Image (tube, rainbow, N blue to C red):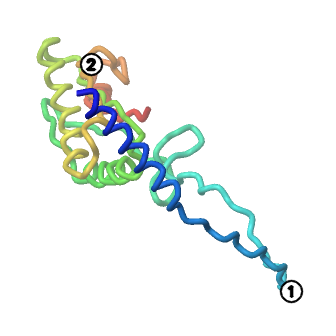
C-alpha cells in the first residue's frame, strides 16, 4: 500500500515537472510605433437632450387629449343604468391609449349614484358603473393591475340637491389618475 502511494506521488511530481518544462515562451510584442499625425476635422457634437416629457398629462397630472385640452374624467349614466354612451366610449378610448403608453400610471374608478334607492342597491349600482368603465379599458389593452375600483353609492354626491338636475350629476363614474 505504501509503495502504491509513493509511486503515485512520484508519478504526479514527474508529470508536473514535464508540464512546467514544456510551457511555451511567448515572445514579447514589439512596441507600438507612434502613428503619424493625421489631419482630422473637428466633429460638431449635439448636446444630448433628455427624453421629451410626456404630452399625455398636464402640469397637474391631468390626462390630455391630442389637442392639448384636459380629457374628461366623469362619465354620466341614466337612471338605474350602467351603460356607457358612444361619447363616453370615444373618451375612454383616449384614456386607454394614455394608459397603455404610460404603464406606470394607475387609476381609481369611482362609481356613484343619486340618493334614490336603498343603500345596498346604490352600492351595487355604483360598482356596476365602475366595472363598465374598467371593462372597457381592459378590453382596450389597459392592464388590470393599473385599475382599482370603488363604489360610493349615494355617499358622495356631486350636487346635494333633491331634484332631477342634481340627481343627473350624481349618477356618474369618475376616473382619478394616481
Residue under the image location 70 percent in, 61 percent down:
48
View extreme (top): residue = 119
Q: Residue at x 68, y 60 (%)?
A: 49
Q: Quadrant of residue 156?
A: top left
Rendered residue at 84%/79% (across/down): 34
**Residue contact between numbered discs 2 and 1, judged by CB atoms under 8 Å:** no
Left or right of 161 in this view: 41: right
Q: Residues within 10 Å of mark 1 (few under 14, many from 20)?
A: few
Residue 152 is tagged as: 2
Count of numbered marks: 2
Query: Residue 62 or 83: which is nearer the viewer?
Result: 62
The residue drawn where x is 18% and y is 38% is 132
Q: In the image, which disc is placed on residue 160?
A: none
Q: Helix, strand, or loop for circle 2?
A: strand
Q: Which residue is mark 1?
A: 36
Say which of 98 and 2 sits in front.
Answer: 2
Q: Label 2 crowding class (10 Å Cα cut-off): few <14, some 14-19, many 20+?
A: some
Amino acid at each position: 500500500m505504501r509503495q502504491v502511494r509513493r509511486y503515485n506521488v512520484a508519478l504526479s511530481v514527474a508529470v508536473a515537472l514535464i508540464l512546467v518544462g514544456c510551457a511555451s515562451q511567448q515572445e514579447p510584442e514589439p512596441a507600438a510605433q507612434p502613428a503619424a499625425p493625421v489631419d482630422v476635422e473637428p466633429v460638431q457634437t449635439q448636446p444630448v437632450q433628455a427624453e421629451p416629457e410626456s404630452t399625455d398629462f398636464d402640469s397637474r397630472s391631468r390626462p390630455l387629449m391630442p389637442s392639448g385640452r384636459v380629457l374628461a374624467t366623469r362619465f354620466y349614466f341614466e337612471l338605474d343604468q350602467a351603460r356607457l354612451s358612444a361619447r363616453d366610449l370615444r373618451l375612454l378610448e383616449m384614456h386607454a391609449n394614455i394608459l397603455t403608453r404610460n404603464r406606470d400610471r394607475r387609476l381609481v374608478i369611482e362609481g356613484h349614484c343619486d340618493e334614490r334607492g336603498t343603500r345596498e342597491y346604490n352600492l351595487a349600482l355604483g360598482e356596476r358603473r365602475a366595472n363598465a368603465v374598467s371593462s372597457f379599458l381592459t378590453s382596450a389593452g389597459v392592464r388590470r393591475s393599473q385599475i382599482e375600483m370603488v363604489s360610493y353609492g349615494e355617499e358622495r354626491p356631486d350636487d346635494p340637491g333633491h331634484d332631477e338636475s342634481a340627481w343627473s350629476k350624481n349618477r356618474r363614474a369618475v376616473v382619478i389618475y394616481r
